[in-house]
């Protein structure tokens, strides 16, 4: 059974659109907001629920929830129900363990600084 946030299958990209420009532009737009970049960076340390993310970033829960919804819509975070909470994490294909210093957006890669614990 699909979840409430499941998106309908998209049409294949037009011939010659190797970048999958529609999907890529949606991901880049979602990452174009500083708070969302901070959320992605925070989730590099592991899964967290909205309250934990809001506390870490010193943001209201409702604001954090909005940003997580945008990131989820762009397939930049995964959601998993854990009891009464929803836990957010980075998809395995977005941050492959073998290349953890880059976000793999499919159309391009975004270089990331070393996590705070690695400095």
Image (cartoon, rainbow, N blue to C red):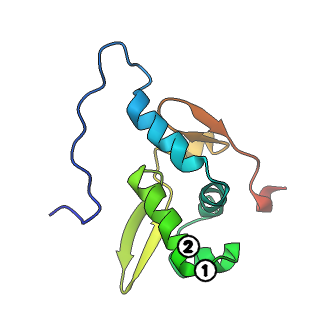
Q: How many numbered marks have been drawn onto this rendered protein structure? A: 2
The residues tagged by marks 1 and 2 sit, at their Cα atoms, a distance apart of: 5 Å
Q: Check disc 1: other Cα within 10 Å, few if <14, some if 14-19, many if 20+.
A: few
Q: Check disc 2: other Cα within 10 Å, few if <14, some if 14-19, many if 20+.
A: few
Q: Residue at x 46, y 52 (%)?
A: 91
Give the quarter of the image for residue 53.
bottom right
Circle 1 residue: 60
| On screen, residue 62 above or below 116 | below
| On screen, residue 22 above or below 74 | above
Helix, strand or loop at mark 1: loop
Q: Residue farthest to the left?
A: 1
Helix, strand or loop at mark 2: helix
Q: Residue at x 39, y 54 (%)?
A: 73
Q: Residue at x 45, y 41 (%)?
A: 26
Give the quarter of the image for residue 72.
bottom left
Place of residue 31 in the rendered image (x, y in percent of width and height, measured from the top left): 58, 48
Q: Residue farthest to the right?
A: 119
Q: Taking 55 as reference, is 2 left or right? A: left
**Quadrant assignment for the C terminus:** bottom right
**Quadrant assignment for the N terminus:** bottom left
Q: Taking 22 as reference, is 29 left or right? A: right
Place of residue 79 in the rendered image (x, y in percent of width and height, measured from the top left): 40, 66
Q: Are marks 1 and 2 in contact (CB under 8 Å)?
A: yes
Place of residue 37 in the rendered image (x, y in percent of width and height, measured from the top left): 64, 54
| On screen, residue 54 above or below 28 | below
Circle 2 residue: 63
Place of residue 50 in the rendered image (x, y in percent of width and height, measured from the top left): 52, 76
Residue 56 vs residue 64, the one in the foreground: 64
Q: Residue farthest to the top?
A: 16
Q: Residue at x 53, y 68 (%)?
A: 47
Give the quarter of the image for residue 58.
bottom right
| On screen, residue 35 above or below 101 | below
């Amino acid at each position: 059974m699909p979840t409430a946030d499941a998106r309908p299958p998209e049409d294949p990209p037009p011939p010659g659109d190797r970048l999958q420009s529609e999907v890529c532009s949606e991901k880049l737009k979602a990452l174009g907001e500083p708070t969302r970049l901070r959320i992605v960076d925070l989730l590099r340390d592991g899964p967290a629920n909205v309250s934990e993310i809001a506390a870490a970033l010193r943001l209201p829960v409702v604001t954090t929830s909005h940003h997580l919804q945008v990131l989820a819509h762009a397939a930049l975070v995964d959601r998993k129900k854990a009891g009464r909470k929803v836990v957010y994490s980075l998809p395995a294909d977005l941050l492959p363990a073998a290349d953890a210093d880059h976000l793999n957006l499919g159309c391009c890669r975004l270089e990331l600084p070393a996590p705070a614990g690695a400095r």
